[in-house]
Amino acid sequence: MRTGAVSGVEALLRWNHPDLGNLLPVKFIPLAEETGLIVPIGRWVLKTACEQAIIWQKQGLPPLSIAVNLSPRQFQDENLLRDIDEVLQRTGLEPALLELEITESMVMQNVQRAIKLLTALRARGVRLAIDDFGTGYSSMSMMKQFPIDTIKIDRSFVRDLEKNPQDRAITTAIISMGKALGLNIVAEGVETEAQSDFLRGDFCDELQGYLFSRPVSPAEIVALVTPTVNSPQLQPRTKKRRAHA
């Protein structure tokens, strides 16, 4: 938020179906989760995202954080740590540039296992984010037990910031408590300048949403990031805005 520059990207999955066209995740992820195919799909997404991050660096972009969502079934997979180790080793991506996103419900299913797994990931240097925060059954006091770096405020609170005082109060509380715990705060689903202004006033760290960029191809990320890198008013090391890839 301080610089207005791009700080990282989030990998989004689409299925280019030969007959049905470009399918959104809601059309195929539930079935993949049910059948177990989500595990190899997730492994492929992780590998492809990390490879793309290295490609961008070779194209001259500054190191960008790349966020990858873990599915519930993938989070429970006993080979998850091994898969992450292999991907980081093969691609050469710096672990701190990989941010794994999980949801509150995933960590609350088995708290002790989640703490152990997240601690192991954190020890590897990988960054961890709680996605869609505020929609699950956890509390901020519960969050302090997990070795996480970031909480992402769910878009359902951001959407009505302009007209709903309750959403404004909840969002402000999440930012304040997150700051008290030393966490990075990202607001999801930002689509208007009014939302951006409110979140800037409440000292949210990063914003993500259509106000900045709709989902784009990896090639388009280069054009999206380059102007912010070349601006003399911005410092690439403190970039505070997210795009989607």
Image (cartoon, rainbow, N blue to C red):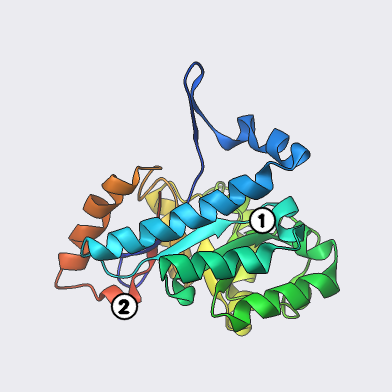
Give the residue drawn at x 55%, y 74%: 126
**Foreground tag (2 vs 1):** 2
Q: Is residue 226 left or right of residue 209?
A: left
Secondary structure state at the residue bearing disc 2: helix
Pinpoint residue 116: horizontal percent, then vertical percent.
Answer: 76, 77
Q: Is residue 50 left or right of residue 77?
A: left
Pinpoint residue 219: horizontal percent, then vertical percent.
Answer: 28, 46
Q: Neighbour class for label 2 at 10 Å: few (<14), some, many (≥20)?
A: few
Mark positioned earlier in the residue sequence (2 or 1): 1
In the displayed structure, 157 sits above or below 66; it is above
Q: Nearer the viewer, residue 27 or 209?
A: 27
In the displayed structure, 32 sits above or below 69; it is above
- The amino acid type found where label 1 is placed reads Gln
Name the residue carrying label 2: 237
In the displayed structure, 167 sits above or below 146; it is above
Pinpoint residue 239: horizontal percent, then vertical percent.
Answer: 34, 70
Q: Quadrant of residue 168?
A: bottom right
- The amino acid type found where label 2 is placed reads Arg
Q: Is residue 10 at least partly visible in the picture? A: no
Q: Is residue 229 left or right of residue 243?
A: left
How many numbered marks appear? 2
Name the residue carrying label 1: 166
Q: Neighbour class for label 1 at 10 Å: few (<14), some, many (≥20)?
A: few
Secondary structure state at the residue bearing disc 1: helix
Q: Is residue 102 at least partly visible in the picture? A: yes
Pinpoint residue 38: horizontal percent, then vertical percent.
Answer: 67, 44
Marks 2 and 1, how far apart at CA: 35 Å
Q: Nearer the viewer, residue 77 or 156?
A: 77
